[in-house]
Amino acid sequence: MKEETDLAGGHSLYLVDSRLGLAKLGVAPDPQQRLRELQVGSPVRLRLVLAVPYRTRAQARAVSAALGHQFAARRAHGSWFRVTCTEVRRALERPPPPPVAAAAGLSDSLCRQGLTWVVSAAREFPSGGPAGREGQLA
């Protein structure tokens, strides 16, 4: 059975926390499956802390890119950042600054919506949620 964060043909923006002060922003059709894939190569336990569904992969990637630009100064490496779930959620609750939106190729229509239509569908996993005890994989 598919997670309720999945939409037909859609993808989710996800945030995975490493407990090392680093979090990975990414896009996947199934954030739980992506967590399992990332865990295989990680020496520390990872937790899925946020999943936000989008209707299309392009929308999810555009928002991910906008967040990447917005948090560029806090990028550790690749798509790993020194950010918290709260900071990402707050960023999603308001439209990105115009230069960030333009750099990420985020459409004007999505920016005008303030991204709040997708945040209302977000699933936040304060303790790691369904991934297992305290958000860890079993």
Image: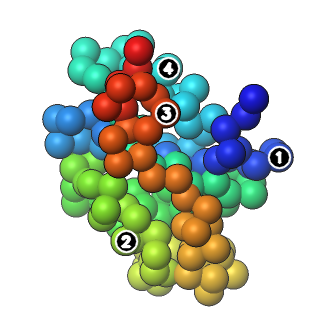
Inter-mark Cα distance, 1 to 3: 21 Å
For the N terminus, give its image quadrant: top right
Residue 132 visible to an observer of this rendering: yes
Q: Which label's residue is closer to the chain start, 1 or 3?
A: 1
Q: Position of residue 62 (x, y in %)?
A: 58, 60
Residue 130 image label? 3
Inter-mark Cα distance, 3 to 4: 16 Å
Secondary structure state at the residue bearing disc 4: helix
Residue placed under numbered mark 4 in the picture: 37
For the C terminus, give its image quadrant: top left
At label 2, counting other C-alpha atoms closer than 10 Å, the crowd grade (few under 14, some 14-19, many 20 or more) is few
Q: Spot the residue most to the front.
A: 133
Q: Residue at x 38, y 38 (%)?
A: 128
Q: Spot the residue most to the right.
A: 8
Q: Position of residue 101 (x, y in %)?
A: 50, 74
Secondary structure state at the residue bearing disc 3: helix
Residue 8 image label? 1
Mark 2, mark 3: which one is toward the viewer?
Answer: 3
Kind of residue at badge 3: Pro
Q: Residue at x 42, y 46 (%)?
A: 125
Secondary structure state at the residue bearing disc 1: loop
Colour scheme: rainbow
